[in-house]
Amino acid sequence: MSPEKKRIFTQKITLGLTVHRPEMILLMADQMRRHQAIFLEEPPADGFEQMLAGTLAVDDYLRPLDVEYPAFSRDMCYLLRELRAEGKKIFQVEPFLEILLGIHEFFAEGHRPGELKSNSIQYPVYLAERNATKALLDYYQTAMTGSFDATIAAVQQFARMDAARFRLRDSLRAQEIRLKIGNYSSSYVEAGVIHYPLWQLLRKQMSQPEHVKVLHLADEALKTIGEKGHLYGPGDQLTLLYVFHPNLAQTRREALLAARSIIFSKIVKKEERIDNLNTFPHLRDELACIRVTNQLGEDDCRRLFPLVRRAKRSGALIIVIEYLTEITPQIKEDFHTTKSRSPSENEIAEV
């Protein structure tokens, strides 16, 4: 009798890249339900288990937390309750942010940065956050008072520092997930779209890299409404360029992406929307703004910069659309806008 073949245990991991907007939750729910364990992109928070169990109100759980997208976070909590009731294992795994919160508490107790030990994990996290924050503040200042070229340089410097922060953040998270993944046969790792490099890091950490796949949920969402494309704005593209090529310097591609990101940041809608979620309003807006800025060269951005730098989103959008209608006849034909009204969402999406 031939010896019985030993069964090989397979661990499947899905990295779900998403946009943290309420309209994405149904798609995220569908994917999460297909997995045994779920690893959230957030640090451990007090009251999390009680919230999942229903003994702590969602609003009471979220109140002390500094969440960037309140509506998304609230809806996610209700989804996570359902998933826990269905037997899913749910973990909060974001060591970079967890360490950073500990550093903030350390400073709140009266300690100073010089007291962080250089050989501790806290030290590189502190440096990465400090450098990125400084570069961001420098960009804000330069964008309001500096020249176009100075602003381009400030954008590139921030993107470099942000990329360094993301490299450390994703590396720490991949290592932590490997330690926590245990014997789960299937795991879903939640992450924002900017964390695409986490896919490679997870593959390096796992013993079965061929079973680690990446899923672009935003792309899937766009397909459902007859659209296609990747939701990477020029700023995200520049940051990822530096993540993968940290020593890249002074190429035309960098300057162009930096220039476009300045305009993109002025016209993209940042506020959360909770109406008509089945039409994916945030995704439509971001895709439209990406398509608009993709038509701009560096010289176009140079001309637009002084016109939009102090304008609100609605005003900046009108300025950019009117500029494009002057240089592109087709757009001029599609946009018979008057000074009495702003272009509609549907019109913007047609660009």
Image: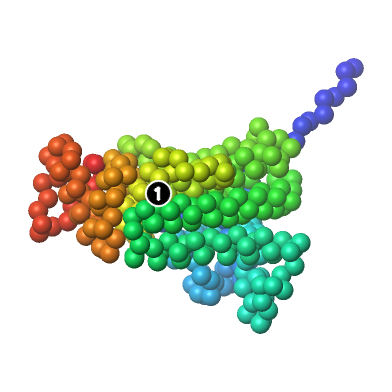
Residue 93 picture location, percent across and down? 64, 57
- Which corner quadrant of the image does residue 106 belong to? bottom right
Residue 320 picture location, percent across and down? 23, 51
156 left or right of 45 in image: left
> Would you place residue 226 above or below residue 264 in this image?
above
Badge 1 density bin: few <14, some 14–19, many ≥20, Cα 10 Å: many
Count of numbered circles in the view: 1
Of the residues shown, which amino acid type is indicated by label 1?
Ala
Instruction: Specify the quadrant that holds the N terminus.
Output: top right
Residue 131 picture location, percent across and down? 56, 62
> Would you place residue 153 above or below residue 57 in this image?
above
Q: Residue at x 46, y 51 (%)?
A: 156
Say which element carries label 1: helix
Q: Name the residue under label 1.
A: 258
Farthest bottom residue in view = 110
Q: Residue at x 74, y 48 (%)?
A: 182
Question: In the image shown, does 272 or 144 lie closer to the viewer?
Answer: 144
Question: In the image shown, does 331 or 164 lie closer to the viewer?
Answer: 164
238 left or right of 149 in image: right
Q: Using the rendered image of the protein, determine whether residue 230 is visible from the camera's viewpoint.
A: no
> Would you place residue 113 above or below residue 321 in this image?
below
Q: Residue at x 65, y 43 (%)?
A: 202
Q: Using the rendered image of the protein, determine whether residue 117 is visible from the camera's viewpoint.
A: yes
